[in-house]
Amino acid sequence: MQNLFRHVPSLLIGSVLGSFIALNASVFATRNDAEAVKSLPFEELRTFTEVFQRIKTDYVEDVEDKVLLEHAIQGMLTGLDPHSNYLTPDAYQDLQVGTTGEFGGLGIEVGMDNGFIKVVTPIDDTPAQRAGIQSGDMIIRLDDTPVKGLNLNDAVKKMRGKPGTPIKLTIVREGQDKPRTIEIIRDIIQVKSVKNRLLEEGYGYVRVSNFQSHTGDDLEKAIEHLRKESKNGAIKGLVLDLRNNPGGVLNAAVAVSDAFLNDGLIVYTEGRIEDSNLKFKAKSGDLLNGAPMVVLVNGGSASASEIVAGALQDHKRAVIMGSKTFGKGSVQTILPMNNNAALKLTTARYFTPSGRSIQAEGIQPDIVLNKVEINSVESNGEELNIKESDLSGHLQNPKGKTEKDKVKAPEKMPEPESEAKPSEEESKAEALKEEGNEAAESKETKEDGKDSKNAANASKEVSKDKKKKVPLVKSDYALYEALNLLKGLAIVDSAKSGITPASKPVTKAPAKSSKE
């Protein structure tokens, strides 16, 4: 009797699997009678039921069937590739919130790598970025909990929490001898996917930190804002910064690419099912009217970022500058399930307009920039180089004058002495009068001394703040090089066309998608 009870779980699973097999066989047959019904792997399923039974009867603690089956599903999906996953109802809800641009946590995009959590990229203006977390960091411990053995969902759930509460991340960083611990205070993460500013007159900068559903619209607003800030509404060139952008919504990447293209293919996807075979094409209209572009990328630029960089590179629309990108060339589809959970399943690969697959290869920049840190760009103000104007007896410029040849301002002439000199008594009286005035002034100075001192200190602070302004070459060397390249491209472009970029804004229609 006892043996019979030991085999009850396997008998139940066997009956369920039998019903599942029969049901699926009928579904397959009704879908297409011409196709042979593929048989399920009975031997492997028998092994699965045997393992399930052993866990239920022999494991040191009792485990619910629901938990075991969820683990089995998670293992089945995570074993496929690093991006396929089973999303519990809570994880599915978090994903939906994340695509809208606001969620709670630390502000890092992460993935699994050999059982550890790998940082794909820290998100701009988040606690993780401010704490110094970098792309490529391996997280080996969350507070006192080792990451090894946790699945991605559990690790993410542990990193999230109430805003204002701390968490310690122990990380391993390439090039460092030992792990380091970084404490981060959780916060509400509000991601602004598009930021913009003028680098110099006529030269714009747009930073896209990730691709959300409204990123395409935000990009158009950013370009319009730059145009209003520029003189005559002209944009001579643009730097598009996709560094440490982990990707996001595919349609947003298409919209960003389409904003700078007049026609042609942007990206196409290929998968096993018909719905996975899509082509996205650009509509007429370039928001910059052909003004030159430089796109900045690095190892943290992944997925949708690589779609944009690949499309603009293939169409010769922009110069790609930086380091090789991440190399994620696969498309994940979210498939909702009846229990409010979802499958995040890799359903296709995407290809650039020229047919390149980015998967595990990445985008190779047109101009490679190594990681450079500028320690000092300060000058002592002394010109040590000898110039022509320093040579004795140099020829003068017939159309101008050198600094040394400029006429000096006449020295101030001494004032003539007065014809009527004061007497000795008048001089003494005047001296006593001046002495009294000085005493009065001294008293007033003492009374207002604190205010004067405070004003002087405030003036010094303002002066100090001005001196603290870090030059672009030191704060962001890659952006500095991109701006210099952009200036050169604008000069060449102007010389070829003989005209400056038009200032009239361009309205873009949505990009077309079509099935193959």
Image: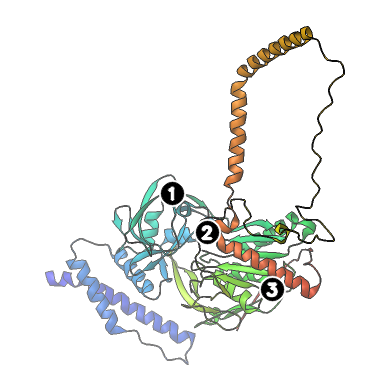
Compared across the picture, whether 94 is left or right of 152 comes to: right
For disc 3, the neighbor class at 10 Å (few under 14, some 14 to 19, many from 20) is many
Mark before the other along the chain sequence, 2 or 1: 1
Looking at the rendered structure, the kind of residue marked 2 is Ile
Out of 288 and 436, give the one closest to the viewer: 436
Looking at the rendered structure, the kind of residue marked 1 is Arg
For disc 2, the neighbor class at 10 Å (few under 14, some 14 to 19, many from 20) is few
Q: Secondary structure at mark 2?
A: loop
Residue 214 in view in this figure: no
- Residue 378: give x, y in percent of width and height: 57, 53
| Res 186 label | 1
- Residue 108: give x, y in percent of width and height: 46, 58
Looking at the rendered structure, the kind of residue marked 3 is Leu
Would you name the residue on which mark 3 appears?
261
Q: Residue at x 61, y 44 (%)?
A: 466
For disc 1, the neighbor class at 10 Å (few under 14, some 14 to 19, many from 20) is many
Mark before the other along the chain sequence, 1 or 3: 1
Mark before the other along the chain sequence, 2 or 3: 3
Q: Secondary structure at mark 1?
A: loop
Query: Closer to us: mark 2 or mark 1?
Result: 2
Cα–Cα gap, marks 2 and 1: 32 Å
